[in-house]
């Protein structure tokens, strides 16, 4: 299997203006003192506040930091990615973001760049989009599983303990086999994934964790804290 380096944050970091240690953890995964960083804010419709926070947060920590606007054509995006070490994807509407990427060709560009050495990171929508499937909530109506980009095997759920209804929805989706075995991540936690699954994690909030949730042969749901 091709190598990948993806860091998924359940909630926090510069776009939420909380847990700055999680941002630093993402940068460390590149292995450079001052990496070249890009930011994708498509899930929040390129919210100017989040873009401003991005520039302020990383001005002194990177060799360069660039916002990658939603208007970029696929080749222009690929050209930008070829000059970067890591791309950070912000939170927001995961379904809208993934749909946009599939319609404008960004999905292929990002998925091609990851095994070639580009590190990926993100929070909430930007954390779970890389998985086979993710638990999505539009803000109204029931939560539901949707198809992700498939760079990481299995399902994903952010904000797991912060939003209590997510636990029940995740368990129900897995029990009904609407989602595969899933990694659920609390706010204040980041998990780095390689080709074979989680390889390290960072916890910035006492009591917060990441969990493996799976359906056993007897149909029961098992939830286990990830310890790395």
Image (cartoon, rainbow, N blue to C red):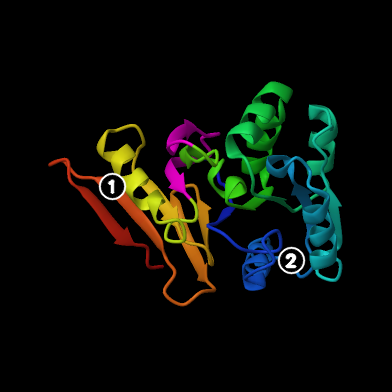
Q: Nearer the viewer, residue 195 or 57?
A: 57
Q: Residue at x 85, y 71 (%)?
A: 60
**Residue 71: % across, % down:** 84, 32
Residues marked 2 and 1 touching at CB (< 8 Å): no
Q: What residue does disc 2 label? A: 32
Q: Look at the numbered disc 1 and give the secondary structure of its residue.
A: strand
Would residue 4 be seen by someone viewing this image from the given angle? yes
Report crowding for label 1: few under 14, some 14 to 19, many 20 or more residues within 10 A (C-alpha).
many
Q: What residue does disc 1 label? A: 214
Spatial distance from mark 2 to mark 1, Cα to Cα? 36 Å
Q: Residue at x 83, y 28 (%)?
A: 73
Q: Is residue 19 left or right of residue 217?
A: right
Q: Which residues are magenta?
A: 141-157
User: Nearer the observer, disc 2 or disc 1?
Assistant: 1
Toward the top, the furthest residue is 103
Image quadrant in which the C terminus is located: bottom left
Q: Is residue 59 left or right of residue 211?
A: right
Toward the bottom, the furthest residue is 206
């Amino acid at each position: 299997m091709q190598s990948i380096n993806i860091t998924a944050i359940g909630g926090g970091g510069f776009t939420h203006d909380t847990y700055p240690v999680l941002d630093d953890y993402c940068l460390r995964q590149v292995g450079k003192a001052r990496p070249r960083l890009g930011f994708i804010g498509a899930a929040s419709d390129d919210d100017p506040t989040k873009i401003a926070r991005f520039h302020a947060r990383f001005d002194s920590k990177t060799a360069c930091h660039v916002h990658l606007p939603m208007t970029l054509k696929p080749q222009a995006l690929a050209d930008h990615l070829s000059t970067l070490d890591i791309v950070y994807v912000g939170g927001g509407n995961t379904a809208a973001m993934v749909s946009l990427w599939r319609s404008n060709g960004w999905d292929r560009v990002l998925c091609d760049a990851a095994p070639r050495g580009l590190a990926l990171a993100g929070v909430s929508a930007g954390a779970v989009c890389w998985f086979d499937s993710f638990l999505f909530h539009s803000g109204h109506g029931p939560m539901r599983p949707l198809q992700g980009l498939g760079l990481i095997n299995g399902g994903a759920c952010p904000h797991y303990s912060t939003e209590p209804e997510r636990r029940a929805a995740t368990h129900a989706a897995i029990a009904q086999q609407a989602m595969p075995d899933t990694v659920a991540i609390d706010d204040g936690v980041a998990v780095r994934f390689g080709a074979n699954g989680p390889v390290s994690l960072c916890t910035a909030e006492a009591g917060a964790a990441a969990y493996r949730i799976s359906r056993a042969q007897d149909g029961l749901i098992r939830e286990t804290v990830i310890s790395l």
